[in-house]
Image (spheres, helix red, strand yellow):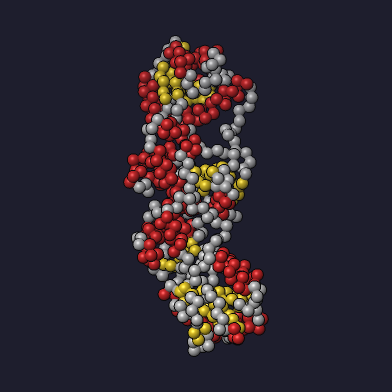
């Protein structure tokens, strides 16, 4: 679609009907002239954007018409495309005329007509000016030059690239190469405003359209592209022919499917150009949406057979934040609830029950969250990760040796509080055992709880035997020093045995068990501080 006017000068009524029908359907405004005289007169009246001119006309030729146009300053810069059955012999005659920019050999098919007209409109004015002034014609229109950021995906993932641009609130266009396909992600302040592509058949998107948008399916043939046709949609919006609300929904659906396709195929290279402004259509109807929301929306359109396999025993959990894009603009409230439920590992059926959703819908949303690397699946495993801070070197060595040979627990025992804190932030332990006899350990625990939202973690405090009556709050259990590795393992077994009952620590006085261990009576999980 376009708001451009094309003047066709040809004495063949068949050609005039063909060109009028083809270009009108493509959105051009078409004027028809069967003679040279009428053609020049129409050029004076209409000032068309392009003239499609037949070489052989009654009593004259296209060459004479071009000279008449050049003689008038206000018509001399109108690009002209010559059409002829003589092909090369005819084109030689026009080689020295600066207003002739291309040739369309007869006979021609409709697609060749549209391609030639579109290209001539894009390049015609520049070519006429270059040929009139005797300057060189550029090889590339709107040449990109050096990109602001570029690379190959063997060194970076698409998530890392897009998150970098989002977190930096960048404006511009990210172009991605994937085989013979090209994707353009248009950004403003780091958020996605629209996505276009080349090499992607529109059926990839129309097949997933919801019923409410199916009547707009033909529009996707235009919105997928990046050329002047997008301007035609803006014209239709201005004349109220298209409903802007429905068109924005269509553009968002298109963006969601295209982004999901990018994230699920092998990519080759990328370049980001901060100087490329938004296409007119997306400036008029910006999506202003996050990558997270688009990937979840795209995942909701995926057929169940194409989802990654997950058994009933597969659990999903949130991953530690590592520079991800945390922008949730456009993500539904219900979808956000899933992230809140994944503070502890859960199966699809457990999430579906908690949310009162269909299991397939939950699986699709989880799939979108997996692509953003906010969530990952975990196989059902009896091995639990334990992180332990112990100041006594001899005790630490014994614990490492004993726990290293235990099949139920994989433990890391550290003596340095700073190293312990770094590891606690970068990993996802199931239990954290803290030696509270170290002066800075209580502050360390408070810092960790402020920076983590993992409510599934079991917190165990190690205290001096002489102070065993003073129990610090917020722990699932307490272990009195001196203690053995066996005592610790037995305590861990008891703490995790209560996991099915949604634990939370309480400040009630703990009791002693048969192992001489102190276990809180109420073992519900602590409510951790959130930033």
Residue 428 higher or lower than 227, as above or below: below
- Left or right, 340 with respect to 276, comes to left
Of 156 and 255, nearer the camera is: 255
Where does residue 258 sit, x and y in percent of width and height? 46, 47
Total tally of numbered discs in the picture: 0
**Residue farthest to the top?**
59
Residue 462 higher or lower than 315, as above or below: below
Of 256 and 435, nearer the camera is: 435
Q: Where on the picture, by quarter, is residue 392? A: bottom right
Where does residue 456 sit, x and y in percent of width and height? 49, 70
Residue located 51% across and 88% down the image: 515
Residue located 47% across and 37% down the image: 284
- Left or right, 297 with respect to 131, comes to left
Of 74 and 275, nearer the camera is: 275
- Left or right, 34 with respect to 511, comes to left
Of 8 and 525, nearer the camera is: 525
Residue 393 higher or lower than 237, as above or below: below
Q: Can residue 180 be seen in this view?
A: no
Residue located 51% across and 53% down the image: 327
Where does residue 378 sit, x and y in percent of width and height? 47, 68
Quadrant of the image containing the N terminus: top left
Q: Is residue 187 visible?
A: yes
Residue 388 higher or lower than 324, as above or below: below
Quadrant of the image containing the C terminus: bottom right
Residue located 46% across and 12% down the image: 60
Q: Where on the picture, by quarter, is residue 39? A: top left
Where does residue 457 sit, x and y in percent of width and height? 51, 71
């Amino acid at each position: 679609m376009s708001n451009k006017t094309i003047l066709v000068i040809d004495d063949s009524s068949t050609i005039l009907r063909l060109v009028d029908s083809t270009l009108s359907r493509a959105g051009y405004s078409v004027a028809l002239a069967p003679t040279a005289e009428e053609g020049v007169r129409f050029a004076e009246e209409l000032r068309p954007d392009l003239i499609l001119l037949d070489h052989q006309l009654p009593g004259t030729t296209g060459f004479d018409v071009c000279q008449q146009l050049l003689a008038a300053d206000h018509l001399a810069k109108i690009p002209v495309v010559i059409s002829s059955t003589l092909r090369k012999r005819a084109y030689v005659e026009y080689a020295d005329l600066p207003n002739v920019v291309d040739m369309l050999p007869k006979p021609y098919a409709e697609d060749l007509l549209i391609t030639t007209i579109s290209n001539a409109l894009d390049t015609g004015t520049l070519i006429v000016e270059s040929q009139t002034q005797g300057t060189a014609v550029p090889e590339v229109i709107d040449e990109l030059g050096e990109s602001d950021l570029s690379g190959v995906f063997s060194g970076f993932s698409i998530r890392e690239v897009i998150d970098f641009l989002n977190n930096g609130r960048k404006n511009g266009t990210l172009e991605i190469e994937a085989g013979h396909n090209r994707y353009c992600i248009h950004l403003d302040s780091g958020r996605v405003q629209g996505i276009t592509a080349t090499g992607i058949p529109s059926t990839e998107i129309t097949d997933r359209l919801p019923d409410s948008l199916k009547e707009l399916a033909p529009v996707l043939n235009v919105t997928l592209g990046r050329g002047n046709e997008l301007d035609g949609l803006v014209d239709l919006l201005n004349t109220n022919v298209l409903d802007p609300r429905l068109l924005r929904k269509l553009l968002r659906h298109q963006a969601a499917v295209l982004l999901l396709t990018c994230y699920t195929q092998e990519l080759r290279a990328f370049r980001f150009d901060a100087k490329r402004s938004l296409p007119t259509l997306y400036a008029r109807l910006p999506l202003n949406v996050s990558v997270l929301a688009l990937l979840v929306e795209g995942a909701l359109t995926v057929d169940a057979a194409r989802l990654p396999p997950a058994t009933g025993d597969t659990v999903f959990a949130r991953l530690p934040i590592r520079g991800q894009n945390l922008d949730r603009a456009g993500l539904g409230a219900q979808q956000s609830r899933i992230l809140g439920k994944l503070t502890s590992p859960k199966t699809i059926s457990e999430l579906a029950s908690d949310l009162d959703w269909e299991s397939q819908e939950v699986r699709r949303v989880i799939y979108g969250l997996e692509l953003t690397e906010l969530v990952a699946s975990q196989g059902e495993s009896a091995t639990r990760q334990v992180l332990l801070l112990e100041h006594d070197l001899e005790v630490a060595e014994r614990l490492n040796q004993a726990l290293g040979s235990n099949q139920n627990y994989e433990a890391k025992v550290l003596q340095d509080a700073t190293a312990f804190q770094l590891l606690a932030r970068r990993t996802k332990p199931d239990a954290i055992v803290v030696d509270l006899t170290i002066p800075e350990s209580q502050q360390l625990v408070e810092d960790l709880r402020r920076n983590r939202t993992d409510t599934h973690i079991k917190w165990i405090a190690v205290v001096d035997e002489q102070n065993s009556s003073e129990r610090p709050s917020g722990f699932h259990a307490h272990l009195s020093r001196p203690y053995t590795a066996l005592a610790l393992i037995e305590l861990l077994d008891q703490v995790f045995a209560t996991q099915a009952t949604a634990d939370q620590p309480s400040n009630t006085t703990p009791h002693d068990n048969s192992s001489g261990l102190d276990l809180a009576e109420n073992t519900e999980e602590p409510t951790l501080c959130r930033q």
